[in-house]
Amino acid sequence: QVQLVESGGALVQPGGSLRLSCAASGIIFSLCDMDWYRQAPGKQRELVAAITTAYKTHYADSVKGRFTISRDNAQNTVYLQMNSLKPEDTAVYYCSTTWDTTRWGQGTQVTVSS
């Protein structure tokens, strides 16, 4: 059974940092490209960052230089380090991968507010 479980979301002040984690099971993690998406209220879900099996990374323009995606194949976990957070980063953050089909976690809420 494929599971993606996100954690690390919280309420943080503008300029603060958070690290999100996504623990995967039921897949051969080292063979999977991993993505982080986010969805703000009233907006479409958008790709935030991606990391391939070869550790190649991609970022949305809105987070370049502030967010860092990484993976630990030994722990079957993908991370999203978020620095210099802005109110517009407020959203539910989801990790995703494609195994037998596209899989999503349940999401973790990030709220950036003073």
Image: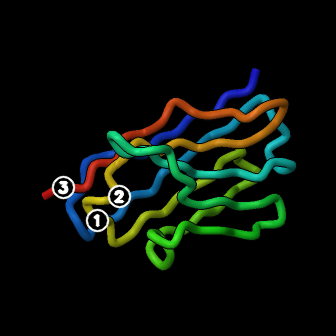
Which structural element holds mark 3? loop
Residue drawn 86% across the image and 49% down it? 31
Report, in whole angstroms, how far the alpha carbon at label 2 lies from the one at label 3.
Answer: 10 Å
Above-or-below relation of 79 to 104: below
Judge the density around disc 2: few (<14), some (14-19), many (≥20) Cα neighbours within 10 Å: many
Colouring scheme applied when the structure was drawn:
rainbow
Residue 113 image label: 3
Q: Quadrant of residue 40?
A: top left
Where residue 53 appears, as percent x and y from the top left, is 82, 59
Badge 1 element: loop
- Cα distance, mark 2 to mark 1? 5 Å
- Amino acid at dot 1: Lys
**The C terminus sits in image quarter:** bottom left
Residue at image coords 41%, 42% = 92
Mark 2, residue position: 89
Residue 86 numbered tag: 1
Which residue is farthest left?
114
Badge 2 or badge 3: first in the primary sequence: 2
Q: CB atoms at circles 2 and 3 under 8 Å apart?
A: no
Q: Amino acid at mark 3?
A: Ser
Question: Pointers 2 and 1 in contact (CB under 8 A)?
Answer: yes
Left or right: 45, with 18 as reference point: right
Residue at the (77%, 60%) spot, across then down: 52
Marks 3/1: CA distance?
8 Å
- Front residue of 36/83: it is 36
Q: Measuring from the top left, give residue 50's x and y in whole percent.
A: 66, 59
Three-letter code, disc 2: Asp
Q: In the rendered image of this protein, does residue 109 appear above or below residue 86? A: above
Does residue 105 lie above or below 57 as drawn? above
Q: From the viewer's perspective, is 62 left or right of 80?
A: left
